[in-house]
Image (cartoon, coloured by chain):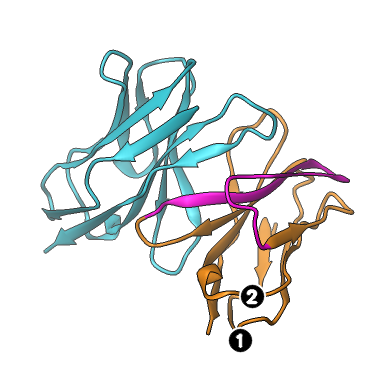
Amino acid sequence: AQSVTQLDSHVSVSEGTPVLLRCNYSSSYSPSLFWYVQHPNKGLQLLLKYTSAATLVKGINGFEAEFKKSETSFHLTKPSAHMSDAAEYFCVVRGNNAGNMLTFGGGTRLMVKP
Amino acid sequence: NAGVTQTPKFRILKIGQSMTLQCTQDMNHNYMYWYRQDPGMGLKLIYYSVGAGITDKGEVPNGYNVSRSTTEDFPLRLELAAPSQTSVYFCASQGQGNEKLFFGSGTQLSVL
């Protein structure tokens, strides 16, 4: 069994300040972890993924995430927020079974203030 | 390259009506999925398919049916629409051994 918990349903930052979106997971095996972003009225887009290689993963648009096994966390960060980063972000764990089933977190709405 | 195409984008149904959400992909992907997205709940897997002729239930299959007669198409059928099925539905596809999911743009469904 596996689960994903996004610790904040809403995060608000000012433009130019750092972004931290928190994600904790539980999994009975070595997981694959992902962050997806969903902009308003659009589909989901892959930001980055961790698949047991380097624990610090760099993604698109300046985002990165660090896999910490001891803390069962996969937090998403960005040094400096941009207005275009305002969106919904989903942390996802991949199942080790037929169909590669994914389990999604509840999502974090990122708001960026000017 | 169209990717994953979902139709319709919006639909309002009355309780008890039926409809089919269409999904097609042009990337020759074996894996296809249907998710529903409820506010604050993330995405829940309804059904998935690992290839033409093969489908299986996800987390929340009740009230839905699917078929996969071709590699390209993976329609989702609602037989007797209920208010609990009001949601945004996403179709996705994935190439075998490739972990990136490609999502459609979604279908917003309201059952009144």
Q: Is residue B102 visible?
A: yes
Q: Which residue position is annotated with label 2?
A: B81
Percent coordinates x, y for residue A55 in the rendering? 36, 17
Chain A colour? cyan
Give amino acid for label 2: Ala
- Same subunit under labels 2 and 1? yes
Q: Is residue A72 left or right of residue B60?
A: left
Measuring 14% from the left and 55% from the top, which residue is drawn there? Answer: A12
Q: Which residue position is annotated with label 1?
A: B14
Chain B colour? orange
Measuring 55% from the left and 80% from the top, which residue is drawn there? Answer: B111
Q: Judging from the image, what secondary structure is the residue with disc 1 in?
A: loop
Say if B69 sits above or below B9 in the image: above
Camera-side residue: A112 or A5?
A: A5
Q: Is residue B52 left or right of residue A102?
A: right
Q: Quadrant of residue A4?
A: top left
Numbered disc 1: what chain? B
